[in-house]
Image (tube, rainbow, N blue to C red):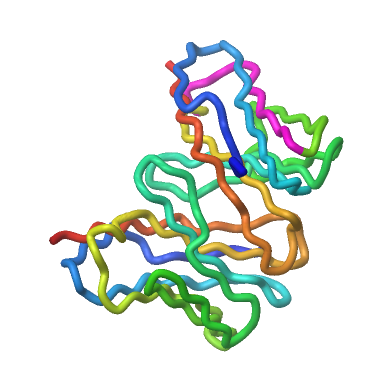
Amino acid sequence: NAGVTQTPKFRILKIGQSMTLQCTQDMNHNYMYWYRQDPGMGLKLIYYSVGAGITDKGEVPNGYNVSRSTTEDFPLRLELAAPSQTSVYFCASSQSNRGPDTQYFGPGTRLTVL
Amino acid sequence: GDSVTQMEGPVTLSEEAFLTINCTYTATGYPSLFWYVQYPGEGLQLLLKATKADDKGSNKGFEATYRKETTSFHLEKGSVQVSDSAVYFCALNSNTGNQFYFGTGTSLTVIP
């Protein structure tokens, strides 16, 4: 049981390049989330999904896209990388979004845009 | 809207000192409250949680009590260790929406 896995661990992009951050969970959780964590700051929600085929915007969605074709996978797409997207990205999952349910986090992807 | 306000850091303590990290919240209804810990280079992991007023969550010597009257969920530990050095995040789930709300995190360094 690997939990939530993310790839890659590190990536450097040039301005204008695109990339996809991968996230997979093996706990059969319905809910998945993408957060970014800027230095010295808390987590900001980018997008979330309540199940396969259903996604919705969070607090800071601009510059990102997501898809959820399966329960397990929730990739995050950056189309035109900008320096403001330099951050650590965390994927998380939970069984439900209500009540005392816990979010399980991946180890993060550290992205630098130069 | 829902939100969490957390004591700013960084906090530096000597080993065996008493720790308090303050957390207050704003939410409609009856949220569930969480403390997450992030060790260097890792993702967040659940430390403890409480689901209703007056509940006390506890784990690894850490405790927090859900106080509805003061809308607080302060984290405490009686005697910190060097291995407790990490960033601590207070969070809530409002039970009415699809999102968790996190505080800005408090960095703790424990020196021998």
Q: Residue at image x 52%, y 59%?
A: B46
B68 and B112: which is toward the camera: B112
> Above or below — where is A26 with respect to B45?
above
Does the magenta stretch mainly form a helix, a strand or a loop? loop
Which quarter of the rendering shows the C terminus of chain A?
top left
> Above or below — where is B14 with respect to A38?
below
Relative image position of residue A94 (x, y in whole percent): 69, 53
Query: Can you tell which quarter of the image residue B11 is in?
Result: bottom left
B84 and A12: which is toward the camera: B84
Left or right of A65, for residue A52? right
Query: Can you tell which quarter of the image residue A66 is in?
Result: top right
Q: Residue at image x 69%, y 67%?
A: B94
Residue reaching furthest to the right? A53
Which quarter of the rendering shows the N terminus of chain A?
top right
Q: Residue at image x 75%, y 46%?
A: A28
Residue A37 part of the magenta-drawn span: no
Query: Where does the magenta region start and end?
Result: A72-84
